[in-house]
Amino acid sequence: MGARGMARPLLAEGLGTAALLAVVIGSGVMAERLCGGNAGLALLANTLATVFGLFVLIELLGPLSGAHFNPAVSLVQALRGALPRRWLAPYVGAQMLGAVLGAWLVHAMFELPLLQFSQHVRSGPAQWLAEAVASAGLLLVVLRAPAGRASALVAAYIGAAYWFTASTSFANPAAALGRMFSDSFAGIAPASVPGFALAELAGALLGLALHRLLGTSAHDDR
């Protein structure tokens, strides 16, 4: 498929990732403003918005691009042959650009400085382990979800992982990049991003390995 054939999938990936980051960061900003310093309540509000938003985005854009919105997912799908390998770099580029634009959109909507960096340090072995676990679980859900149920299962898993992982489950290098540009409840300090991204990619590969060990599922196991 040529460049024209890639246009719609790439637009869907960029738009979907931007919308996902807008949901995650925007709901974090709103929760921080409304919850009066109650971090648990703010996280709950952030979780619910993310679950609902992720479900809708996968349902709407999945038929166009697969609704990856995540370089780790795209990498695994390329390794499996479910995504043409020549599409991997354009997919990742669209996701990364979308993530940054999503953060900036939130800042514009909430009248915050457009250009900023998070000061929220998220680092250390426990955080990296949590991201690896979150990403491995996410890939297992993506690869093993029965046909027509991926959107609900992925959204539900991410909602649960917000609470059972120490890192609140970014599980997505593009999300880490976008959240780096927002000094808000959902942000992550730039120095913390490389550790998160490496843990997420390692977790994604672990998820693929576990999927293969578990054997055939609703998907063709390549």
Image: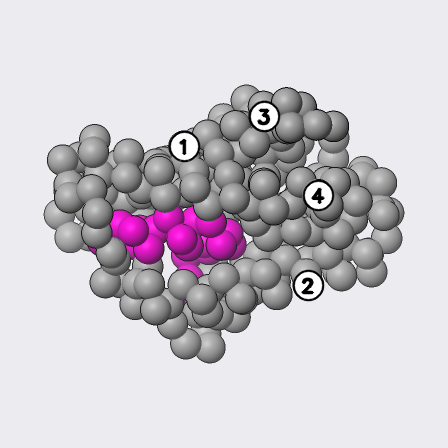
Q: Which mark, residue 86?
A: 4
Along the horizontal axis of the image, is 11 left or right of 62? left
Left or right: 96 in relation to 103: right
**Gap in Å between the C-alphas at discs 1 and 2?**
28 Å
Q: Type of residue at label 2?
A: Leu
Q: Secondary structure at mark 3?
A: helix
Give 124 or 103, whichever is nearer the viewer. Answer: 103
Judging by the rendered image, the residue that carries numbered circle 1 is 19
Q: Quadrant of residue 208?
A: bottom right
Pointer 3 or 1: first along the chain: 3
Q: Quadrant of residue 85?
A: top right
Q: Against 129, is 91 above or below?
A: above
Q: Is residue 178 left or right of residue 128?
A: left
Which residue corresponds to mark 2? 206
Distance, label 2 to label 3, CA atoms, is: 31 Å
Say what secondary structure mark 1 lies in: helix
Q: Which residues are magenta?
A: 166-187
Q: Earlier in the sequence, mark 1 or mark 4?
A: 1
